[in-house]
Amino acid sequence: MYHPMKMLFKYQSSLYQESLVEQQQKENLVLQILVLLDQEMSCIKQLICHALQNQIQKEILFSQT
């Protein structure tokens, strides 16, 4: 026998499940982006530190001559 309410509930339930999966995928993407940004910031910090160390070494060398 055909039960419209039962069919509607199943349809809504499947939509809800799909939206949960999509939400989880979006959250995972955001987390991946945050990890990549954190790694990039670490690289930038290292580059800045190396540049500062090189500048300090140059200044020390120039001050000794």
Image: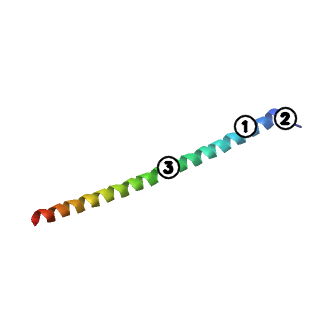
Q: Position of residue 40 (x, y in %)?
A: 41, 55
Q: Taking 48 as reference, is 14 left or right?
A: right
**Which label was assigned to residue 1?**
none
Quadrant in which the N terminus is drawn: top right
* Distance CA(mark 1)–CA(mark 2): 14 Å
Residue sitting nearer the eye, 28 or 8? 28
Residue that carries the numbered disc 3 in the rendered image? 31
* Distance CA(mark 3)–CA(mark 1): 28 Å
How does the figure colour the protein chain or chains? rainbow
- Label 3 sits on a secondary structure element that is helix
Residue sitting nearer the eye, 29 or 46? 46
Residue sitting nearer the eye, 18 or 50? 50
Sequence-first disc among 1 and 2: 2
The amino acid type of the residue labelled 1 equals Gln
- Label 1 sits on a secondary structure element that is helix
The amino acid type of the residue labelled 2 equals His
Q: Taking 58 as reference, is 13 left or right?
A: right
Q: Who's the residue at 71% across and 39% down the image?
A: 13
Q: Who's the residue at 11% across and 62% down the image?
A: 63
Q: Position of residue 15 (x, y in %)?
A: 70, 41
**Which label was assigned to residue 12?**
1
Sequence-first disc among 3 and 2: 2
Sequence-first disc among 3 and 1: 1
Q: Position of residue 9 (x, y in %)?
A: 75, 36
Crowding around mark 1 (Cα neighbors within 10 Å: few <14, some 14 to 19, many 20+) is few
Labelled pair 3, 2 in contact (Cβ < 8 Å): no
**Which label was assigned to residue 3?**
2
Quadrant in which the C terminus is drawn: bottom left
